[in-house]
Amino acid sequence: MPRPLSAAAVAALAAIPALSLGGLASARDARLSAEQFIAARQASYDMSAMTNGSMRDAMKAGREPKTQVYPATVLGKWARVLPSLFPAGTGQGETKLASQALPTIWSDRAGFEQAAANYAAAADKLAEFAKANDTEGFKTQLVELGHACDACHARFKAGDQGPK
């Protein structure tokens, strides 16, 4: 027998129609703070690193590349939106949050966007190898994906993965 809903759950469910009919600001009106942009991109980088690591682990464990179609595809989707997480005012020293985003992200915006596009292309190719269940191609492309990641960090990220 299902458990009855708590009073808080009932109140939350009752509020959904009101919120969806205009009680919330639309995406067009939404404004993230600089700190929220930084937190979002740092979390997304963590997820990217975890996704890369899980794919490497899957290959070391002898799993078939076709089991990695989703994570490889997601990395491409992420890379295509990544530049939008770097609006002006979110660099090092511009907020109270720590950031490793170098000023070159904004002074060479075209270069930064190209680096993200290169990563997306590498991830898309990785997904193609996964769909084809091509183990050797997938393993080789996983290395290439890492190179695309490193190339971006070398120009646009401070810290241990940044410029040498």
Image (tube, rainbow, N blue to C red):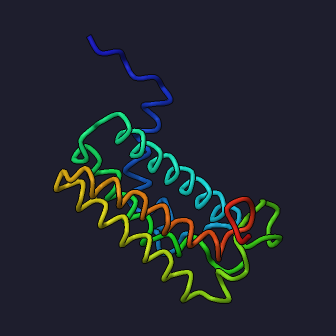
Residue 107 picture quarter? bottom right
Q: Residue at x 40, y 60 (%)?
A: 75
Please identify the residue farthest to the top as the structure is shown.
1
**Residue nearer the viewer, 42 or 29:** 42
* Side (left or right) of 144 relative to 96: left
Q: Which residue is drawn at 71% across and 71% down?
A: 163
The picture places residue 26, in percent across and down from the top left corner, at 46, 68
How many labels sit on residues?
0
The picture places residue 30, in percent across and down from the top left corner, at 54, 69
Point out the image quarter for the N terminus.
top left
Asked if 34 appears above or below 73 in the picture, the reply is below
Q: Which residue is drawn at 37% across and 17% down?
A: 4
Asked if 157 appears above or below 74 in the picture, the reply is below
* Side (left or right) of 31 relative to 4: right
* Side (left or right) of 52 relative to 85: left
**Residue nearer the viewer, 84 or 109:** 109
**Residue nearer the viewer, 10 or 154:** 154
* Side (left or right) of 130 relative to 113: left
The picture places residue 130, in percent across and down from the top left corner, at 24, 54
Point out the image quarter for the C terminus.
bottom right
Please identify the residue farthest to the left as the structure is shown.
132
Residue 152 picture quarter? bottom right
Q: Which residue is drawn at 57% across and 51% down?
A: 46
The picture places residue 147, in percent across and down from the top left corner, at 49, 66
Asked if 6 appears above or below 163 in the picture, the reply is above
